[in-house]
Image: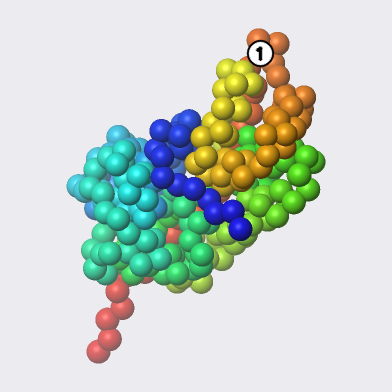
Amino acid sequence: MTSDVWELGDAYEAYVGRWSRRIAAEFVRWLGVPAGARWVDAGCGTGALTSAILGAAAPAAVIGIDPSRGFLQTAPANRVVGDAAALPLRGGGVDAVVSGLALNFVPRPERAVAEFVRVAGPGATVASYVWDYGAGMRMMRHFWDAAAEVVPAAADKDEGPRFPICREPALRDAWSVAGLDDVVTRAIEIPTVFTGFDDFWQPFLGGQGAAPAYLATLTTAEQAGIRERLRATLPTAPDGTIPLTASAWAVRGHKPPARHTI
């Protein structure tokens, strides 16, 4: 079984990190967390979301947590090796717990959401965003469609069917089941314009992420078949650019205030 690879920060940046940063900036604006808050970025990766928090939210502190030591080498702010489903933090100590493009990689996402709620203080914001792998993340949708035409078994690795949490109803349900109040979801879409075919294709050769890791397992002929299928089917503008879009689903809620009993 092919496993997703998450270790080399530079390769990840070329693949989706550059697009994640733009999603992260809009996500942080949407949350509207007051200045001076204490944040946790669970599954911080190379720090796209952490950077957006530091740049726009005037936080008192941000702790970035990720299992990949390779990614943490490039992440900004306070960095801790850890699992989103078992956060190495005491309960109730932070004002905002967020996660960007990571929840679907937790084997049981509901455990991660429960951990987000545990470490959040009363009234804290708990929020996440994930790629819309089914339709909205166009660069990956084009890749998996082409891969399945060349290698039918590729359909089993497609992130759309693999990650049901990356659908709006599932995200909303996960936040509601966790007992969060004021649950709201939205789509965040950005343009992803590639300068040409090489700008689109080369990041898939970096080995970082589900699609590049799968591509690396194929024969040279299979890789070439996918490449040429993409070259023939990707939309290309008159100036040679490839104009696509990337969409993520975002969800937010608030931890209920503490209930006092007499």
On-image quarter of the C terminus: bottom left
Describe residue 232's horizontal placement relative to residue 259 as left or right.
Answer: right
Q: Residue at the location (26% across, 49% down)?
A: 79
Task: Give the amino acid at mark 1.
Answer: Gly
Report helix, strand or loop for mark 1: loop
Q: Taking 63 as reference, is 46 left or right?
A: right
Q: Is residue 189 left or right of residue 260?
A: right
Residue 28 picture location, percent across and down:
39, 42
Image quadrant occupied by the N terminus:
bottom right
- The residue located at (58%, 18%) in the rendering is 195
In the displayed orientation, state which residue is furthest to the top: 239
Position of residue 211 relative to residue 93, above or below, is above
* Residue under label 1: 240
Query: Are there few (<14), some (14-19), or many (20+) residues within 10 Å of tag 1?
Result: few
Q: 73 or 44, which is in the foreground? A: 73
Residue 24 at x, y = what percent?
Answer: 43, 40
Can residue 253 be seen in the rendering of this structure?
Answer: yes
Q: Considering depth in this image, is 226 or 123 the residue closer to the camera?
A: 226
Residue at image coords 53%, 51%:
4
Q: Residue furthest bottom?
A: 262
Q: Is residue 257 above or below residue 186?
A: below
How far across and how far down the image is residue 69, in percent? Answer: 33, 49
Say above or below: 203 vs 115: above
